[in-house]
Amino acid sequence: MKNNSKYIVTYLISISILLSSDIGKCNICYGDIYEDYFKDAWGNIYHKEHQKSAKFCDSCYRVVSVAITNGGYYLPDNRLICNLCYQSSINTINYAQVNLVTMIDYLSKNGINIDINLVKLNLIYKHEVNLVDKNHIDYKGFTYINQDEKNNVFNIFILKGLPIQEFNATVAHELMHIWISKNNIVLDIELEEYYCNLISKDIYSYYDDDFSRIKMKSIDLHLSKNKFYNQFNKQKYLINDIVEHINER
């Protein structure tokens, strides 16, 4: 799923022009706010002068500070993950594999049957893969999928350090690409991406938390830029609707 993280962060941050005597405390420097301020996707406010230096979590889009997230961590590929997201981040292949099995089981129960023996999961940092298409390096929750013709196995590469909701949504997205490929379904590349993003959104919808709701808004931004956006009605597409929509084409 392609993502321009700067665009998303900018879009999900709003500037509020309020001139009340005391708006509240800045979540970066703790100082009082008396004039224009910025607000991140979570409603955390901070002085306008911090905007150029403010750092945002690569996963949840919160402004990273001691007050809001208890700091954060720079991963080896320079992604910044706040401490809140880091608590559930997936960094080991064993933990990743457990979640892969869960996602394959969930998709299979809903008509997207995938043989786990055809899937090899790899955890990576961005700098560990030399991509031909350099645009992929800017993907949010970067994933790369390629089929090993010799072994007839699909290799999926997922970034280390994703919180569990984002990891599962990303894995499901890539599994959908595999299902489309294995079933010889020929789609325009943007339409295929649209369907895969809908699958990610379906996964997020099962998490009853603010993180997932914000990630769903992020996906909606991507969908609105897709050339097939107007061909979909505005209903809430769940996994069964997606499969039916593909089969009707």
Image (cartoon, rainbow, N blue to C red):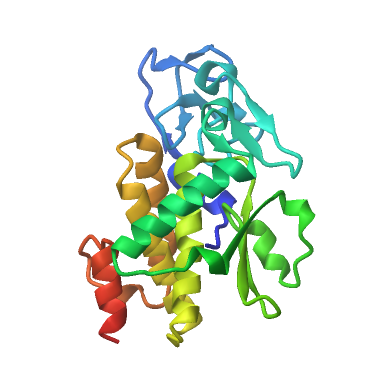
Q: Position of residue 189 (x, y in %)?
A: 50, 80
Quadrant for the C terminus, please.
Answer: bottom left
Q: Is residue 10 visible?
A: no
Residue ID at (69%, 59%):
137
Q: Is residue 93 visible?
A: yes
Drawn side of residue 222 relative to residue 67, left or right: left
Q: Position of residue 231 (x, y in %)?
A: 29, 78
**Is 88 in front, or is 152?**
152
Residue ID at (52%, 62%):
1
Q: Please, is residue 101 above or below residue 109 in the view?
A: above
Q: Position of residue 233 (x, y in %)?
A: 22, 71
Residue ID at (51%, 33%):
62
Drawn side of residue 76 relative to residue 41, left or right: right
Q: How many marks?
A: 0
Q: Position of residue 149 (x, y in %)?
A: 68, 80
Residue ID at (71%, 71%):
133
Q: Please, is residue 142 above or below residue 44 in the view?
A: below
**Is 1 in front, or is 4?**
1
Quadrant position of residue 76: top right
Q: Please, is residue 70 above or below residue 230 in the view?
A: above
Q: Please, is residue 161 above or below residue 235 in the view?
A: above
